Image (cartoon, grey):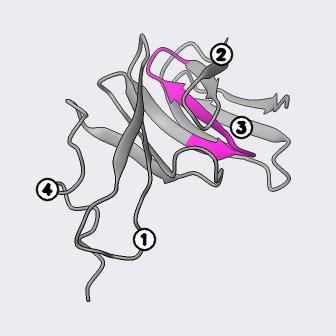
Amino acid sequence: ENCLDILDREKLPHVHSAPVEAAIFLSGSNGSNVASCSLDCKIVFYGKLDMECTTKNKFQIEKIVSQPAGITKIIEVNGFVFTGDLDGTIRRYDDKGRLLSQADAHEDVILSLSHSNDGIYLASSSKDASVRLWLIQV
């Protein structure tokens, strides 16, 4: 059986009202399995993904988080979800969508987020022509 259609729009709750900038798998086993972000200022945490490719869809929304600015990037590091926003803010969430911290990181849109292999540092770049390195505090 072909499993490529398991995430088909017909089977996945359609939540975002603007282009989805990114979707990522989360490594935490206690929280959501997938998160998506959009210019509509929402992060959607999905959970209970049935990877067995059954006909019944068990891909449910666990939480929708609204932010004051559209989200351009999303990554997961050590069980935390980091977002980069149109207003230059970086926000950190746990894998259940609770906001833990935020920083006014750049003066313009965040274009990329990346992390070091050891998960200690976060790098961000922006339309303001800057690159910044951040120490990830656990």
Label 2, residues with CA under 10 Å away: few <14, some 14-19, many ≥20? some
- Chief secondary structure of the magenta portion: strand
Q: Nearer the viewer, mark 3 or mark 1?
A: 1
> Which residue is the site of mark 2?
102
Image coordinates of residue 19 in percent, x first then y, are 25, 37
Question: Residue 10 has which mark?
Answer: 4
Q: Nearer the viewer, mark 2 or mark 4?
A: 4
> Which residue is the site of mark 3?
123
Displayed quadrant of residue 61: top left
Q: Is residue 80 or residue 39 the one in the foreground?
A: 80
Q: CA distance from mark 2 to mark 4?
A: 35 Å
Q: Is residue 2 or residue 67 the one in the foreground?
A: 2
Magenta stretch, residue numbers: 75-88
> Which residue is the site of mark 1?
51
Secondary structure of residue under mark 4: loop
Query: In the image, 133: left or right of 2?
Result: right
